[in-house]
Image (cartoon, grey):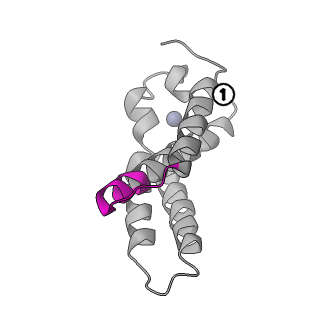
């Protein structure tokens, strides 16, 4: 059963590990793995902020396979974006972390007996 702390720990570990992997060949290491892990622990709570777990059927559109697909498309577009200044690069990093953390939340919820709705209600 995944709860809030499980979501946060899982998102922080996975996003932190991905950030470490992304910097493996860089000469100058940055704080991105730590920043990414902290941001992921915060952003992974977003689905349950949008649709709080106040009853057993709280998972609707923002917990759905359809919304996960939209996030995947957005994530691909952001991944392909090549920012030309440090501010835009920071925005790109934050968006990638947010989408990753949100997706991790949905994957953990999908592994429960209630799983995720295909579309859900709005
Ligand atoms: Zn949830």
Which quarter of the rendering shows the N terminus? Answer: top right
Secondary structure predominantly adopted by residues drawn in magenta: helix
- Residue 75: percent from left, percent from top: 55, 43
Label 1: state its secondary structure.
loop
Mark 1 lies on residue: 114
Q: Tell me which segment is drawn in magenta.
A: 81-93
Q: Position of residue 49 (x, y in %)?
A: 37, 33
Residue 99 coordinates in the image, percent (x, y): 50, 44
Residue under the image location 37 percent in, 66 percent down: 35
Horizontal arrangement in the rendering, residue 122 relative to residue 14 (left or right): left
Residue closer to the observer: 4 or 63: 63
* Quadrant position of residue 85: bottom left
Tell whether position 82 is magenta: yes
Q: Nearer the viewer, residue 76 or 2?
A: 76
At a point 48% along the width and 21% down the height, the residue shown is: 55
Look at the picture and state if 95 lies above or below 68.
below
Given the current orientation, which residue lies at the most extreme front position?
A: 84
Task: Tell which of 28 and 106 is nearer to you.
Answer: 28
Q: Quadrant of residue 114?
A: top right
* Residue 94 as seen in the image, left or right of residue 120: left
- Residue 58 seen from this side: no
Q: How many marks?
A: 1
């Amino acid at each position: 059963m995944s709860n809030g702390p499980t979501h946060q720990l899982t998102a922080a570990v996975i996003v932190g590990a991905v950030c470490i992997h992304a910097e493996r060949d860089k000469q100058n290491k940055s704080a991105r793995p730590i920043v990414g892990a902290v941001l992921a622990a915060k952003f992974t709570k977003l689905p349950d902020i949008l649709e709080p777990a106040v009853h057993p059927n709280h998972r609707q559109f923002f917990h759905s396979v359809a919304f996960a697909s939209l996030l995947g498309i957005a994530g691909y577009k952001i991944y392909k974006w090549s920012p030309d200044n440090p501010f835009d690069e920071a925005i790109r990093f934050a968006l990638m972390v947010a989408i990753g953390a949100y997706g991790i939340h949905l994957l953990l919820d999908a592994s429960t007996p209630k799983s995720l709705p295909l579309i859900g209600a709005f």
